[in-house]
Image (cartoon, grey):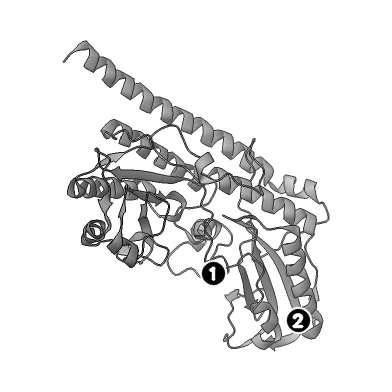
Amino acid sequence: MSTLQLGLIAAGVLLVVAVIAYNAWERRRLRRQFEAAFSPAARAARDPSRVEPTLGGDTATHFPSPESSSDASTRPPESERAFDIPMDVAPTRDTSAAEEAYPAASETFAENAAEGATPQPDPDIECIAELQTTAPVSIGSIAGGLTARLGKPLRWFGRAHGDGAWRLLSKDSPGEFSEFAACLLLADRNGPVSRPQLETFLRVVGEIAPTIPAAFDPPDIASEVERAEVVDRLCADLDVQIGLTITKADGTPIAGTRLRGVAEAAGFRLGSLGRFEWLHADTGSVLYTLQNLKNEPFTVESLRASSTPGVVLLLDVPRVTDPPRTFDQMKLLAKRLALTLGAEVVDDNRRPLDDVALAKIRAQVQAAADTLHEVHIEPGSPRALALYGA
């Protein structure tokens, strides 16, 4: 082995070690800031008169703000949020399912994420407004609230007794309830909930209260706006996506019909959003996607009539339960697709990705997953799916 080869190997090892060390330092820094911002003392300091909603025990899970972050209301576009190493890291702005209800956690999220756990209000990522009725009432009493559209996911819960379990409600929920909890998500990939949205939310709940009738003590809007901005900054900093690009070395395009045949043979299906999706065999959830390099959606017609300069395999780290393992699967599939298409796996600068570069990317995936875990946003969990809705 030549001196040059030994030097390249040593440089590669040092580079991987440097990445791992930096990510370990970054996780410690974020965690200190997170715990400081959402500790009970910090909450009390922001508003001593504000009492956080109580949902059957100590429900605090900490979502503090990073030490330095961009304006929470305007996350940078994808083209401005990329590492200069062979990977893409960008926030997703598509929130087509933003109005759908989602399950979330109470108390420690790990407990609620256990098999058989039921959805509960999540006071760390939702603004919660409670109604305490003077007598048990049916679901029809809050029908107007159930159909409200506020620009952020809204969920309603009910329970028959003050110390009973919360039930996620729908328009067909049977029984009577003595207490309701309206829960509005504080932030998602569209950014934090706005003051007007919060005002509308509390007005909707406030108008329902006298018709039941029910006691209603609304949370402080200024405090909720502040919490929403903190959650949004945290989520923006941890919003990691990994892309592996496949193109032909000579620059010739890939025929759409050829691409579709290869993708479907590999196990992808063409989804409604114009991208091929690889689904988990048991849950049906999307593990990663195959997208057009031209930033145009694929359709059956476009694939039949045109070609593309390349495709991108994309892993949305917060939305899968085991990001490193999923990346390993995606990496192997990218290599197989490239071989079948007569192409190669490259970085953003069209440089081929070797095993050293791919190992570096995997280290980034692991670091991102570890950080999400440390701040109680388990990758692929209902809480993560809510905050990183797509």
Q: What residue type is labelled 1?
A: Pro
Contact check, label 2 and label 1, Cβ < 8 Å? no
Q: Image check: 59 left or right of 13?
A: right
Residue 57, image quadrant:
bottom right
Measured in 3D between alpha carbons, the distance from the residue under mark 2 to the one under mark 1, in whole angstroms, is 22 Å
Q: Is residue 17 above or below residue 258?
A: above
Element type at mark 2: strand
Q: Callout 1: few (<14), some (14-19), or many (20+) C-alpha neighbours within 10 Å?
A: some
Image disc number at residue 133: 2
Question: Would residue 52 be found to the left or right of residue 303 on screen?
Answer: right
Task: Pinpoint residue 243: horizontal percent, then vertical percent.
Answer: 38, 45
Label 2 CA crowd tier, 10 Å (few <14, some 14–19, many 20+): some
Q: Is 371 situated above or below 162?
A: above
Q: Is mark 1 on a helix, strand or loop?
A: loop
Q: Where is residue 341 drawn, in percent x and y? A: 20, 49
- Residue 271 in percent (x, y) is at 37, 65
Q: Say which residue appears at 72% left-offset and 63% top-offset.
A: 197
Q: Is residue 246 visible?
A: yes
In front of the other: 350 or 303: 303
In the picture of the structure, the residue carrying the numbered disc 1 is 119
- Report whether 177 appears left or right of 132: left
